[in-house]
Image (spheres, helix red, strand yellow):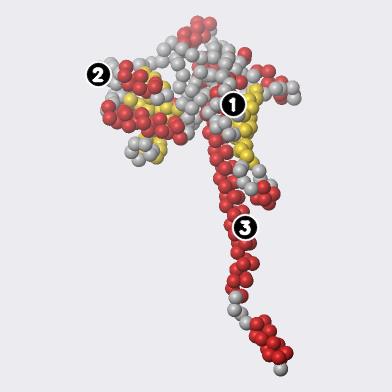
Amino acid sequence: MRNVTQGRRLRRFCLSEAGSFTIEASLVLPVIFLCTIAILFFALFMYQKAVLFHTAAVSADRTAAHWDNSYKDPVTGSYPLDKNDGLYWRVFNDQASDLLGIIGLGNPAVVELPQSGTQPSGSGPNKKLLQAAQQLPVSLEGQLSYSNHGLDRTVQIKLNQFLGIPSLVQDWFAMDQAAGESVAQVTDPVEWIRAVDLTKSYLSRIKGKAPATDVKKTWLESVSDPPEVIIRSEKEASEYLRNFVNGKSVEIETHTVGQYRIIDALDRDGVAHEAKYTINSKNVKDQIKKDVELMKRGEVKGVVWHFFRHVKTGKTALTPSLRRELERNGIVVIVHN
């Protein structure tokens, strides 16, 4: 009788569903928890990779855009008017020996990261790369390199950063560090346009075997001052500036002051140009703050303010104090006659 009673109890225990939810949860919950942790770390890895790529892209673009003068500020592109690398810097200070790379004998300029205490010197590619390297966080590793193959001149930046994640997650996804890489082309748009225009001016007259007197006249015209442009309003100044730099008017959102910044002319290199015929003191202060914000965020590679003379007074709205304020904030000033 006792055995029968125990058998019945065992049977009821086996058929009972009491506590089944707790048992199932104890088996499934660890798996769900591990999957959630893995997804979080994978998202962190992808975020860090995107940050590194953005950092490399911005640094490469700025370095390539400011490559023609080693005295330029690596962020804003501003530089003292009396500072430059000389007329023949492309021959002596631009890694010209790297042209041998076409046949496998080249030696590109390379700077290793991090670079925290090295002071840039000279005016060659190493100085320009060091200036760019010092703008990067010291926690990043990698290298900056510059290759010169004639018309193909490139700045390449490779970055990597070790991730502080558990070794178990590293083994799962084989990711112990994030990497980012970017390449930017070095161009000289202003000099290229000037050379093309000069060539067209010569060819149009020499093509028909022009006499020596005509050639001399053409040369004198090419080196003479361009005709004076008369600007009568702010609108005409903006239109002239857009044609002058081959740019377009854009609006960019700002957070420091106001909601957006209207740029009169944004050229193909990402430099913002502002036309000034008359000014308002309050608006000028706000515009300077917006331009500084855009340069710090990397929305523009540099800012240039163009001042035009008033048709009646013959004077510009540029005052000495305003010039000092603009130059202090890294904004280039150009006065048009």
Whole-percent x and y of residue 278? 28, 25
Q: What amino acid does circle 3 point to?
A: Leu
Q: Circles 2 and 3: CB distance less than 8 Å?
A: no
Q: Earlier in the sequence, mark 2 or mark 1?
A: 1
Judging from the image, what secondary structure is the residue with disc 1 in?
loop
- Cα–Cα gap, marks 2 and 1: 54 Å
Q: Is residue 306 visible?
A: no
**Residue visible at 49% across and 21% down in the picture:** 72
Whole-percent x and y of residue 250? 40, 36
Work out whether 271 lies above or below 15.
above
- Cα–Cα gap, marks 1 and 3: 39 Å
Callout 3: 10 Å neighbours few (<14), some, many (20+)? few
- Cα–Cα gap, marks 2 and 3: 76 Å
Q: What amino acid does circle 2 point to?
A: Lys
Decide which of 31, 313 is in the foreground and name it: 31
Decide which of 238, 64 is in the foreground and name it: 64
Q: Which residue is mark 3?
A: 34
Disc ID at residue 115? 1
Q: Quadrant of the N terminus?
A: bottom right
Work out whether 192 lies above or below 23.
above
**Residue visible at 55% across and 26% down in the picture:** 134
Q: Which residue is mark 2?
A: 312
Decide which of 208, 4 is in the foreground and name it: 4
Q: What amino acid does circle 1 point to?
A: Gln
Q: Earlier in the sequence, mark 2 or mark 3?
A: 3
**Residue visible at 55% across and 12% down in the picture:** 87
**Residue visible at 62% across and 57% down in the picture:** 34
Q: Quadrant of the C terminus?
A: top left
Callout 2: 10 Å neighbours few (<14), some, many (20+)? few
Whole-percent x and y of residue 26? 62, 67
